[in-house]
Amino acid sequence: MFRIVAAITSLEQHFVAIARTPNVYRPVACPQCGLGGLWRHGHYHRKADRGQQDGASRNLVPVPRFRCRGCRGTCSRLPACIAPRRWYDWAVQQLVLLCLLSGGSFHQASRQCGVGRHTARRWWAWLGARHETFAFFLRSRFPEWGRAPDRESFWRTGLDGMPLHEVMAWLDQELTVP
Ligand SMILES: [Zn+2]
């Protein structure tokens, strides 16, 4: 799975950390072979903030890369404010999912949150495909997630106390433990 730095929750924080404390992004160990002591290996740039109003200068965000001195594999780490492989940030995604979880249609979610209907449908399918796995890990760790009788109230109650970017950063850590 992807790897997320949970403590970096805004793009402002990310830009400061990239410039001043880049080591917060360094993974403890290589995700391919498990060896520690990864080297910094430049950045790649990706789009991050179509759902935000930060201005055009923030359209490309640097993401730090690391190289393993053992297997020579590379990996990268994302701050929690950027959703992996996704254009919109977690906050917009959470709004869309909450709208759908409350019985809204794809059309309503799309209009209320300013995303395409196709995107809303894709996010809903994404959650549906991972629900059992995510629910298993979340229920085992957070008792308050365990009381909901169905999938809709499970996520509605859970996201009420823990925003989606935190949920995903936590799951990311759990699911990448060797
Ligand atoms: Zn390695």
Image (cartoon, rainbow, N blue to C red):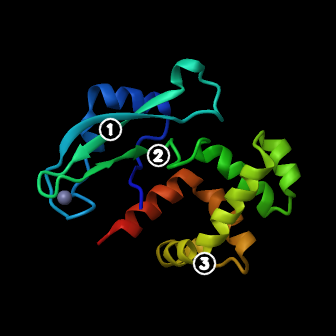
| N-terminal label among 2 and 1 | 1
Element on which disc 1 rests: strand
Residue positioned 37% across, 35% down in the render: 44
Mark 2 closeness class: few <14, some 14–19, many ≥20 residues within 10 Å? many
Could you classify mark 1 by the number of other residues whose Cα lies within 10 Å: few (under 14), some (14-19), or many (20 or more)? Answer: many
Left or right, 129 with respect to 61, comes to: right
Front position in the image: 42 or 49: 42
| Mark 2 C-beta closer than 8 Å to ligand 1 | no
Instruction: Write down the residue under mark 2.
Output: 80
Inter-mark Cα distance, 3 to 2: 25 Å
Counting from the top left corner in percent of width and height, residue 80 is at: 47, 46
Give the residue drawn at x 20%, y 64%.
Answer: 33
The picture quadrant for ligand 1 comes to bottom left
Callout in the foreground (3, 2): 2
Image point (50%, 41%), residue name: 81
Compared with 145, 49 (above or below) is above
Indicate yes or no: mark 1 CB to ligand 1 under 8 Å: no
SS for tag 2? loop
Q: Which mark is residue 146?
A: 3
Q: Which residue is mark 1?
A: 64
Q: In which quadrant is the C terminus drawn?
A: bottom left
Residues 24 and 82: in front is 82
Residue at 49% in and 28% down: 60
In the depicted structure, whether residue 121 falls above or below residue 177: above
